[in-house]
Amino acid sequence: METNVTRGQADFDPSAPPPFKIAEIRDAIPKHCWVKNPWRSLSYAVRDIFVIFALAAIAKYSSTWYVWPFYWAAQGTMFWAVFVIGHDCGHGSFSDSRWLNSFVGHILHSAILVPFHGWRISHKTHHQNHGHVENDESWVPMTESLYKSLPSSTKTLRFTVPFPFFSFPLYLWYRTPGKEGTHFHPSSDLFSPNETSYVITSTVCWIIMAAFLFHLSIVFGPIQMLKLYFVPYWIFVMWLDIVTYLYHHGYETKLPWYRGKEWSYLRGGLTTIDRDYGWFNKIHHDIGTHVTHHLFPQIPHYHLVEATNAAKHVLGKYYREPEKSGPISFHLAKILIASMKEDHYVSDTGDIVYYQTDSKRLRFYENMKSS
């Protein structure tokens, strides 16, 4: 078994089985935090949609060139906020109505070119297997043998900022190295036969949105659509990839990944990390409050902070307070880059493993920095 209890935490082993059960965490969370208010959820969706259209109107009818960079950053962030509301729909934390969750989820996710059910099902797999080396689905660590089999160009794209943070569309089409399938076809390994109609429905909605964007490109011109939609889309993709990466990477002490009998839903969930995004916390619906969400995805986003505060006394050292952010979370850039330099693969064997560093790639980064 690998261990990694350095850097001030020699008295605490994060891979040790916790002295509490998941029921104890659940019981510590106030009952009202579990209540899903569909009107409140809809109000957030309506707010985000209103802001998106307002931003687009301001940018389109403004004659000043310097408005566009601000528009791209703001609109891409709002696309990300809309994704988070659709994410709640996928978990069923938007409301108790499956029909309403599916309807709103399809509208919001199709609008940003995400196949709702295809993504929902794979994301459910991620939550059910979080922290498991082989069975997890989001930013899964590569084994040493898989890593060493990859060509140098693939390693560069995967571990050199900013390339990995444009990967979400590729993940939707091809998944990650070592895994096969697509989010768009029901025959994919991601899905079971009884999920065929769900996948087809979402793929059809995706195609309709893609066709609509093509039509708008003809009407308004491709340059205008590039500025209004596609640049913000790539900002959204960067938000999604960076935030989801930081949920599971970059803590000051490396955190464990599990296999076999050492893995459990609770232990896997406790390897996730909360992050503080400053002003953006409320804009993207407190999605940085992630540990409680991973353990209990049924809790609506507007109760996550309260639920987390209530559960901290049970979690103890298994909860890692996020580093406080200024208005803009610039501090996360250093964490992100450091993780990309150091977190490359895990051992092919062992039921408790930690990320290891490719020394050749680390030297490559250092040479880039010094040149």
Image (cartoon, rainbow, N blue to C red):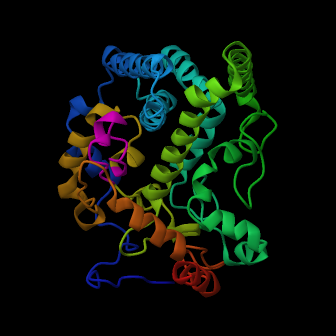
At a point 61% along the width and 74% down the height, the residue shown is 345
191, above or below 265, in the image: above
Question: Which residue is more in the foreground, 65 or 183?
Answer: 65
**119 relative to 163, above or below:** above
Q: What is the quadrant of residue 307 in the picture?
A: top left
Q: Is any atom of residue 256 visible in this view?
A: no
Q: Residue furthest right?
A: 187
Residue 8 in the image, given as x and y percentages of width and height: 26, 83
Residue at horizontal 18 percent and vertical 46 percent from the top: 310
Q: Residue at x 79, y 34 (%)?
A: 185
> Could you say which quadrant of the image residue 18 lies in?
bottom left
229 vs 327, left or right, is: right
Question: Is residue 86 in the magenta section?
Answer: no
**In-front residue for pair 226/295:** 226
Q: Position of residue 105 (x, y in %)?
A: 53, 23
Q: Establish if 83 lies above or below 316.
A: above
